[in-house]
Amino acid sequence: MNINKKDNGLFITATGTEIGKTVVSAGIAATLKNVGINVGVMKPISSGDTSDAEYLKHAAQVDDPLNLINPISLRYPLAPSVSARIEGIPIDIASIETMYGTLSKKYDFMIVEGVGGIAVPINDDFLVSHLIHRLNLPTLIIALSGLGTINHTKLTVEFARQNNIKIIGIVLNQINADTTGLAEQTNPEEIERLTNVPIVGNVPYDKKLESQYPDPQFMVEYFRQHIQWNKLHLF
Ligand SMILES: Nc1ncnc2c1ncn2[C@@H]1O[C@H](COP(=O)(O)OP(=O)(O)OP(=O)(O)O)[C@@H](O)[C@H]1O
Ligand SMILES: [Mg+2]
């Protein structure tokens, strides 16, 4: 990997929830750490539990307290704005920026996992896309590798563009053990043609990634292989 830092981090979004943001964020963090980059992780907002932050913390092998990695932990597994409304506490964006500031001073590169997809509401008039702007980070989009992904990926890319978000690439991810077929084979080329965004990784399913604490060394080997680091111009 050619180390010549351009941005100070990466915001990981996806075409929706349960697409592989945490797994891919963790894989990227573990791999960067393995080549000697001082990498930090953040999951600013979680809904339901703090398992994403724990997964990221384990993969990146950092010692920050969970409430710094994951400052806003909402009670209900709902869109953040909805959970916050039920709980009666609006989400404090300024506190996220402060915590991000603290972490980004400590680390040379930050991997920040979003919540749901890019248009998910955080407060009444504040979406994930607005958070990306506040943190001033380029974005990597995670999408499913199989049938149905073209539409969701195109919508996500167009929404990001309309909102002047810099897209660094798309990673296709397989979240179940189903046999792959023609859709998986033909999707990368069609998505690149339609969006003009490079596919910078194609991550197959592996049961070991489903563990709450996968072996970081396994993650490094797996993500070294399945991310095309030469197309991902982070450094
Ligand atoms: N390549 C993979 N191989 C095996 N399992 C995977 C893979 N990618 C994701 N998974 C599993 O699929 C599920 C969804 O992945 P993940 O939690 O990373 O999605 P997410 O986009 O972060 O979801 P959320 O919106 O809840 O944050 C998890 O149970 C995860 O372990
Ligand atoms: Mg997640």
Image (cartoon, rainbow, N blue to C red):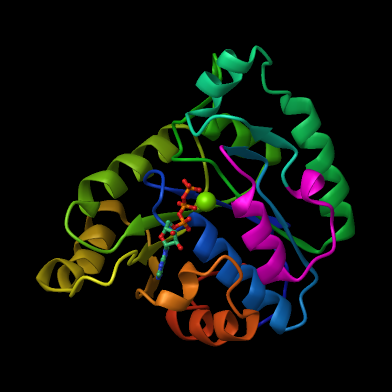
Q: Is residue 113 above or below residue 83?
A: below
Q: Quadrant of the N terminus?
A: bottom right
* Residue for point 47% across, 77% down: 208
Q: How many marks?
A: 0
Q: Which of the four quarters of the rendered structure image does ligand 1 lie in? A: bottom left
| Magenta-highlighted residues | 48-69
Q: Is residue 168 visible?
A: no
Q: Is residue 42 above or below residue 1?
A: above
Q: Quadrant of the C terminus?
A: bottom right
Could you say which quadrant of the image residue 184 lies in?
A: bottom left
Q: Is residue 22 visible?
A: yes
Q: Residue 38 in the image: x percent, y percent?
A: 80, 71
Q: Residue furthest left?
A: 182
Q: Main secondary structure of the magenta part?
A: helix
Q: Residue 26 in the image: x percent, y percent?
A: 59, 66
Q: Residue 3 in the image: x percent, y percent?
A: 71, 78
* Residue for point 57% across, 14% down: 85
Q: Is residue 67 above or below residue 108?
A: above
Whether the magenta-drawn stretch holds residue 61 is answered as: yes
* 78 relative position to 69: left or right: left
Q: Residue 120 in the image: x percent, y percent?
A: 46, 30
